Amino acid sequence: WGTTEVKVPKLADAIVEITETGSSLRANNLKIIDTVLETTTRFIANKKAYEDPEKRAKIDRVIMMLQSVIDAVPKVCLMLNAPQNELESILRVLPSENPTVSHLAKGDWVDVMAVLDKRTLRDVIPRLKAYGAKSIIEIPVSKIID
């Protein structure tokens, strides 16, 4: 069947569903009546297992991967082409620690790639355009591992 939402008309009068935005529920003409529980991701390990160096290393790897997904939620990767003569201005606009800059085949243009907070996009993109940025692409980020 796929998702729980499509089962409602045929199999149930109501459902309890884990949801982040509720968009899938709305798409299936369902509405949230009440919230049963609001929760966050937790990782719980046995103390004895965590004291074992081999098990601890595995646990730490799982934690790192879970944390990388959580850290990526508010972020996007922005790619754009920029005229070389506006690069310094464009780098000042980007709220990113150390953007990647690559020279393009056309010698007076560069490619810029940076990871930034989604909330900054509505202010940043028009400013980038004002400095001549083109081919601006927003890419979802699934993990950030520092």
Image: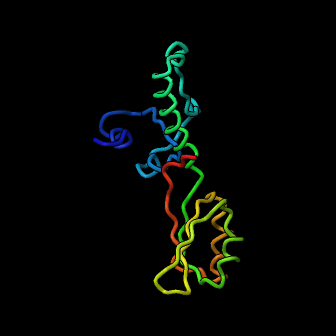
Residue 84 percent location from the top left of the image: 61, 83
Residue 62 percent location from the top left of the image: 48, 33
Residue drawn at (56%, 29%) of the image? 42
Front residue of 117/11: it is 117
Front residue of 89/53: it is 53
Residue 61 percent location from the top left of the image: 48, 33
Residue 51 found in image quarter: top right
Residue 109 found in image quarter: bottom right
Is residue 11 toward the left or the right of residue 15 in the image? left
Vertical position of residue 70 compared to residue 27: above or below? above
Residue 73 percent location from the top left of the image: 56, 49
Residue lying farthest top?
48
Report the number of discs: 0
Vertical position of residue 21 compared to residue 13: above or below? below
Front residue of 80/25: it is 80
Instruction: Check the image and tell me how it is coloured.
Output: rainbow
Residue lying farthest left?
1
Residue lying farthest front?
53
Quarter of the image with the N terminus is top left
Is residue 87 toward the left or the right of residue 62 in the image? right
Residue drawn at (42%, 33%) of the image? 14
Residue 122 found in image quarter: bottom right
Residue drawn at (46%, 83%) of the image? 105
Residue drawn at (49%, 80%) of the image? 104
